[in-house]
Image (cartoon, helix red, strand yellow):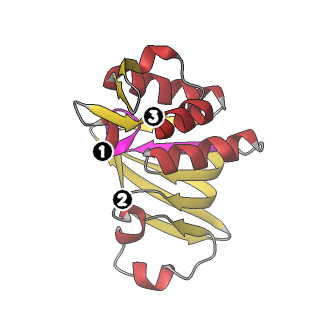
Amino acid sequence: MERNEQYDLIVVGGGLSGLIAAATAAVEGKKVLLAESYSFLGGSWTGSNRLWLPLEHYELLARTLEWSEEVILNRDQEEVALVPAQVKIALENYVMSKGVALLYGVKPYAWSLCEGTYEVSFAGKFGSIRLRADRLIDATEHGALLRCTSSYRDRLLDDHIIAWR
């Protein structure tokens, strides 16, 4: 399936770095799509059944991501226990409030550059989809976007792709 939507930026990977990158670009007026392989944001961190953070880290995240007290299960002087389901909802609400489009349950399997536009092919339960963007960010833990073609090493030098590991 090919969608004729053109994005300024596609971010692959909905962990904390990916969602911050996507939200920042959207706030700057870019049309952004965030693609995540899981059915929720936050990556392996929110996939855990128990989310504990040092109090100072929680306070930074809460300010940055505009969290309410609903995400807190328990708090003491040094740590904060979070409710995983509420954190997932809060992360999704945050990026959507910034205007980011979300695509869940997909993994990239190919990409190409043609006339200054990137085309990325994703596979999911629904089949495959191709999307276009001016820029790409691979915010996955293992460089999924960069590794999905045989010539990814040559493409590491491309200044339009940013790999965060």
Find residue 49 and report its horizontal and vertical position in percent. 22, 30
Find residue 85 and report its horizontal and vertical position in percent. 33, 21
What SS does tag 2 mark? loop
> Residue flagged by tag 2: what amino acid is it?
Glu
Residue topped by disc 1: 44
Q: Residue at x 63, y 41 (%)?
A: 23
Q: Which residues are magenta?
A: 31-43
The reply to whether callout 2 and callout 3 are in contact (CB within 8 Å) is no
Location of the C terminus (image quadrant): bottom left
Location of the N terminus (image quadrant): top left
Residue topped by disc 3: 55
| Cα–Cα span, label 2 and label 3 | 25 Å
> Residue flagged by tag 3: what amino acid is it?
Leu
In the rendered image, which quarter is residue 99 located in? top right
- Mark 1 or mark 2, which has the lower sequence index? 1
Give the number of the mark in front: 2 or 3: 3
The reply to whether callout 1 and callout 2 are in contact (CB within 8 Å) is yes
| Cα–Cα span, label 3 and label 1 | 20 Å
- Mark 3 or mark 1, which has the lower sequence index? 1
Find residue 75 and report its horizontal and vertical position in percent. 38, 22
Residue topped by disc 2: 141
Q: Residue at x 42, y 69 (%)?
A: 146
> Residue flagged by tag 1: what amino acid is it?
Ser
Q: Residue at x 41, y 63 (%)?
A: 145
Relative horizontal placement of residue 54, taking residue 4 as reference (left or right): left
Find residue 32 and report its horizontal and vertical position in percent. 63, 44
- Mark 2 or mark 3, which has the lower sequence index? 3
In the rendered image, which quarter is residue 149 located in? bottom left
| Cα–Cα span, label 1 and label 2 | 9 Å
